[in-house]
Image: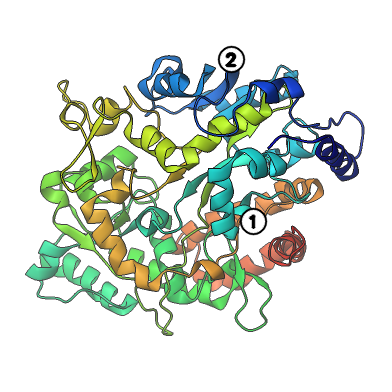
Amino acid sequence: MRYSKLFTVVVIFALLTACSGGGQQTFTGPTDQELDNLNESGMPIVNEEITLNFFAGQAPATNPDWNDVLIFNEYEERSNINIEWRMVPSDSIAEQRNLAFGSGSLPDAFHSSGIGLSDISKYGEQGVLIPLNDLIDEYAPNFKKILDDYPVIKDAITMPDGNIYSFPLISDPDFASHRIQARPFINKVWLDELGMEMPETTEEFYQYLTAVKSDLGEIPFGGPYINTLTQYLLGSFGLANRGGSNSYIDEDPETGEVRFYPVSEEYKEMLEYVHKLYDERLIEQNIFSIDHYQFMTNLGEGMYGSVVWFAPEEVASKEKGKNYVGMPTLEGPDGDKLLTKVGDPVLNAGAFVITNANEHPASTVRWIDYFYGQEGMKLFFMGVEGKTFEKAEDGSLKFMDHIINSKEGLPFEEEAKKYLTFPGGGFPSMVNKDFFQGVANAPQSLEASEKLEPDMIPDDQIWPTLTHTKDEIDQLQGFGTDIEKYVGEMRDKFISGDEPLSEWDSYVTEIEKMGLEEYIKIKSAALERKVGGDDE
């Protein structure tokens, strides 16, 4: 089905009424010339080869040059679309991305470039990024099905003006192990040695940590930073009851309104608990400053009684890592037991955007949509059958031996990136259990997530990531940023004892002075747009 003249008129009218101010541009839809070359389905995408210019973020873990890498070479043959990739190292990507937007010399699209919600909204309203709503309906059947099946994803990427301007990185809503991310592990060898049962409550966890220190003389808890522990404990103290997509806000259980929970009594109670652990030296004392590689070395040597991190057997050490097993969600002192630090499935809203410089928008949408379907995800995460993967007898897909057991002795991701580009993250696709071979799909991760799944916050209770208007963004980048920074700093000080919890009232008063009432008002308005039906 092709864009009709009526559709073009509707698009122009909608955009003209949605945008105001000078310098803004309107997207008029694909040209007849593009549509004449475009196939509506199947491969190739276009009859005559076209070339597109993409700006791409290059994470250290990914292939350094996507102009000559197996999966995109293969896809070029299938699609008849040649991509000229401009690789931009991650340490300079923000600067280079801003230069590209500011110079007016735009690529056809930004891929894996970490564009934030505020920039998506700003450049979308200015017409620099094109609206995708109708292009998705017409040319992205795979992605459209995901939006139809999971409205929470559509909500998360819909901007305040009602438009969608990006294709996101998605965690399959049904792939719990990937959505949970860092999870609690306990040293089962030490647990057995102490003759203790698996902790089920915060008090039992405290008793285990105490026994590790007093009876074994070992480090009870370690981590790369303190907030992996505090995030795990939020639901044990009745906090973040609307999920983890939006830092520091949830629903006040008494009023039903937006609550800034870092000033709640429940949050204070959690800080008191974690401070007690730290004060009694049940938490590694340099957790606020430990070098990440030192933490990983310690974990690999089995030095911790517990951690909240990724599968130790996969990320640290096969030998010592196997001593760890997953822990359940802990029940808190008031009976709360919910794993709340689980975000909406959209991990990166701005994984792929199309600019107004693109002369082939429909073809580009068809190009990216492939990676949200089964065949495209298989290509992206597994590569090409017979070259990078093969089918096992049970029908599952397995990487070939030359990738699993590198002849050069390289770790899996180092070997895999010779052929694939998913190592490093930030990509536009959906991570699912069938094809993703990362840590989340390892047996130790899956076993750990099974213990947590029964207490995961249901999707229908999760608030989607909030998007803000330009005026709201301007305000939040001022006093809003100051409030959130202050909360983080004071959390660490309260836990470490650098600031006594007797100063709690002064802490709350200071946040109120910084503009808490206006902060909550802005968040409430954004939430109303998301869940109140204004986006429809």
Secondary structure, mark 1, is: helix
- Whether tag 1 and tag 2 are in contact, CB under 8 A, the answer is no
Q: Which residue is mark 2?
A: 48
Secondary structure, mark 2, is: loop
Q: Nearer the viewer, residue 44 or 24?
A: 44
- The way the protein has been coloured in the rendering is rainbow
Q: Where's the N terminus, which quadrant? A: top right
Would you say residue 179 is visible in this rendering? yes
Compared with 316, 466 (above or below) is below
Q: Which residue is mark 1?
A: 155
Q: Residue 350: x, y in percent? A: 60, 39
Q: On the rendered structure, is 356 left or right of 236?
A: right
Look at label 2 and name its amino acid.
Glu
Compared with 100, 151 (above or below) is below
Q: Residues within 10 Å of mark 1 (few under 14, many from 20)?
A: many
Q: Earlier in the sequence, mark 1 or mark 2?
A: 2
Q: Residues within 10 Å of mark 2 (few under 14, many from 20)?
A: few
Would you say residue 358 is visible in this rendering? no
